Structures are given as C-alpha cells and as structure tokens.
Amino acid sequence: MTEPNPKHVEPGRAGITAIVGRTNVGKSTLVNRLLGEKVSIVSDTVQTTRNVIRAILTEERGQIVFLDTPGVHKAQGELGKNLNKAARSAVQGVDAILLVLDASIKPELEDDGWFRRITREEVPVVIALNKSDRSPDRSAEYRALWQEIRTEKESDKEPVWISVSALKGDGMADLLSALFENLPEGEWLFPDDILTDYPRKLNIADVIREKLFHRLHEELPHAVAVWVEEIEELENKWVVDVSVYVERHSQKGIVIGDKGRLLKWVKQQAEKELYEMYGVRFQLKLWVKVEKNWRKNFWILKKLGYA
C-alpha cells in the first residue's frame, strides 16, 4: 500500500500574495529567490516587469501564489499610466500584500503612496526591507515614515517588518514564515508541479526583452516592445517568429547593432536561456519593426497585454 503524501493530509495554508512597491526595489529578484527558479525577468531598467506575473510556491506548509507586479513610478505616457494602474489594482482580492522597499536609499514619494494605500487594506501586510546588506541602511527612515502616516490616518494596521537581501538570499526563511503565517487555511489553488501560469508567448517575449535591456541600458529600452507572433513546435526544436517594435527608424539600427551584432547576441543569449527553461532547442527569428508611437496606441498596448 502506498503511503500518502504528507502534504495532502492537511490542507495547510494557501492564498494569493501581491508583491508591490516602487520600481527597481527588487521585486522580481525576490520572487525568483523565493521560488528558487527564474520566473520574472530582472533588469536595472524602469518598467522591466510590464505584466502581472503569477509565480506559485508549493511546499509542506501550503501554497503561495505570488503576483509580481510592475513597479509604480512617475508615469510618462499611456504605457506608464497603464503599468501603474495594473500595479495598484493588483492588491484587490488578494489574501496578503508583500510591500518591498529599497532600504539602501531614502523613502520616495511612491513609498509614501504605498504606505497610505495599505492603511486602507484589510488583508495582512508584510513589509520586506530589501537590499539590507547595502550601506547606508535607511530602514529606520521607512519605519518612521510609516508611523507618521499611520498616526495621520488613525490606522491600527500592524505590518510585519522583515529585513532581507533578495540578491544574497538573506532573510528569505523569515520572510516565507511570515507570509505563510498570514495566509488563510485552505486547499491549494494550483497543482504542485506548476511554477507559473504566465502564458508561454509572454514568457518567451520577456526573456528576449530582458536581453535587449541588458545591452541597451538607458539608451532606448522604454521604446522597445517584444511580441511573439508564432511558435512552431517541431520534433527537435521550436521555431519562434518574434516582432521587436521600436518607435522610430533611428532606433531600429540601434537595436540591430553594427553588422547585426547586438541582435545576434540577444538571439544567442535568449535561445540559451529558453533551452534551460523548457528543455527544448529554440530557433528565434527576430524581426525589428518600426511602429510609430506604439506606447500611445491603445490597440498595440492591448495586444501586448499592457492595456
């Protein structure tokens, strides 16, 4: 007789946790660290995460479905406004909120805004003071700002504060314990072998976009969008047609690079990472296209999942 899996004897704890915060505080790095695998792309560039990504952690204590949201920032244009809207709306209907702060720099306006937002939320809140391994440590300034806002709003909210380093892995055990303790008891929301329900096309596009960001840096990443047109699953490889959108003809040459070197590097790096993710060889066909002012075009934003 087969022994039952002990994880299924009791329902344990299960729920949805929205990971929110200002841009570039390390939310995606934190998600990847907690899950032990890469499910969110990482870059120093604002607006790296453009879609809400569901990452699923299953273990003996239960299951946490993380919503890795776009970072709230000073929005410029329709794309920025839509990303901020997606981030703020992600806290609706969740079981817990994980607010990530960058403890190595002083609080900014967006942090103040999130503090004010969570005073109105009824669900438990865990605050991760990320980059706590860096100097200077501004944690005390965040705590003081929270107390000031809490008093002003006459709120009895009591978040759990955890100092962490997503990059090094410090504080992850304490953070997970705090998250599980604040989730309701219940059955799992997804099977235990699912890491993310993020659509495959969007994931492939994100990997390519991450490689572009690493090479372009601050040159024009916000003007670049990636869309997977078609995936042809052959017996020994997947052939993927990809459109890389830019806004002006001058940007097209920058993305392609001298003698096509930049785009070739992006293709090689993305194919390597996708092989590691899916266990199948990839042949990426990257086509750079000029779509004037795509960030202001509602239909293109909707196609890309940003509207």
Image (tube, rainbow, N blue to C red):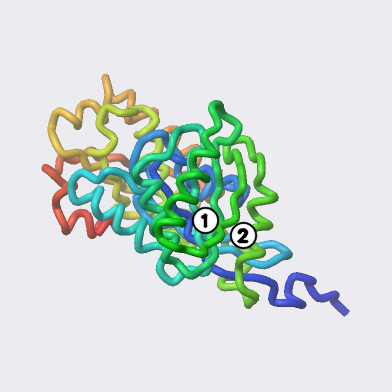
Depth check, front residue: 113 or 276: 113
Look at 39% across and 62% down and name the residue there: 90
> Can see residue 149?
yes
Look at 45% across and 50% down and name the residue there: 148
Compared with residue 160, is residue 108 higher up or lower down, i.e. above or below?
above
The quarter of the displayed image where residue 246 is located: top left
Kindly check if marks 1 and 2 are in contact, taking CB atoms under 8 A apart as contact: yes
Depth check, front residue: 146 or 64: 146
Dot 1, how many residues are within 10 Å of its Cα: few (below 14), some (14-19), or many (20+)?
A: many
> Can see residue 274?
no
Instruction: Identify the secondary structure beneath mark 1.
Output: strand
Q: Position of residue 207 (x, y in %)?
A: 42, 43
Instruction: Identify the secondary structure beneath mark 2.
Output: helix
Q: Position of residue 196 (x, y in %)?
A: 51, 59
Look at 62% across and 63% down and name the residue there: 193
299 vs 156, left or right, is: left
230 vs 276, left or right, is: left
Compared with residue 92, is residue 47 higher up or lower down, i.e. above or below?
above
Q: Amino acid at mark 1?
A: Leu
Look at 54% across and 41% down and name the residue there: 130
Where does label 1 land, which residue?
A: 98
Q: Amino acid at mark 2?
A: Leu
Where does label 2 land, which residue?
A: 179
Instruction: Count up the numbered dots.
Output: 2
The quarter of the displayed image where residue 41 is located: top left
The quarter of the displayed image where residue 59 is located: bottom right
